[in-house]
Image (spheres, rainbow, N blue to C red):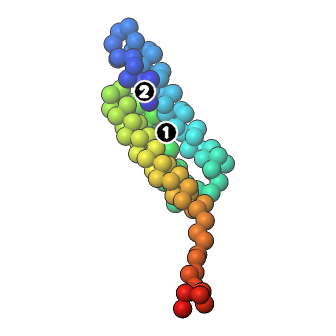
Amino acid sequence: MGGIGCFPNNLQYHVLHDRISMWLVYIMILIIVLLKWLMPKLSQQFLKISYIIGAIMALDWLIFKLTDYLSLTAFELLEFGLSFSWLLLLFQNLEYLARIGDQIFPVQIIKSEDEQ
């Protein structure tokens, strides 16, 4: 994501700026598609939300490429918002998965005969 901001959208860097923004979309959609195999213990709800976000990103990309309805700025803002939201959801689910692995050992304290 930071690569887009490294290159300003001016005459000198326009192509590079545009290519990096497109690669953000490609990489995010690829990660979302492979998510089921990369992290198999994720919840079905998160996978469905991921697929919906990936579909919206792909649809946004198609609208941007095939029509003149979206400007480059609008496209970048929409893609950034979707990808950042998805990353936050991913971190939340990873934290949940990390907590599942904790083992709890119940301890029962019994008075010994010496203390009575």
Which structural element holds mark 2? Answer: helix
Q: Is residue 11 visible?
A: yes
Q: Position of residue 50 (x, y in %)?
A: 51, 50
Which residue in the protein does label 1 denote?
58
Q: Position of residue 35 (x, y in %)?
A: 60, 47
Q: Nearer the viewer, residue 68 or 21?
A: 21
Question: Which amino acid, mark 1?
Answer: Ala
Q: Residue at x 49, y 39 (%)?
A: 58
Q: Residues within 10 Å of mark 1 (few under 14, many from 20)?
A: some
Question: Which amino acid, mark 2?
Answer: Gly
Q: Nearer the viewer, mark 2 or mark 1?
A: 2
Q: Residue at x 56, y 57 (%)?
A: 97
Q: Nearer the viewer, residue 88 or 31?
A: 88
Q: Position of residue 20 (x, y in %)?
A: 47, 23
Which image quarter is the N terminus in?
A: top left
Point out the tag, 2 or 1, that comes first from the N-terminus.
2
Which residue in the protein does label 2 denote?
2
Which structural element holds mark 1? Answer: helix
Q: Nearer the viewer, residue 109 or 63?
A: 109
**Above/below status of 47 relative to 87:** below
Q: CA distance from mark 2 to mark 1?
A: 21 Å
Picture quadrant of residue 106: bottom right
Q: Is residue 86 visible?
A: no
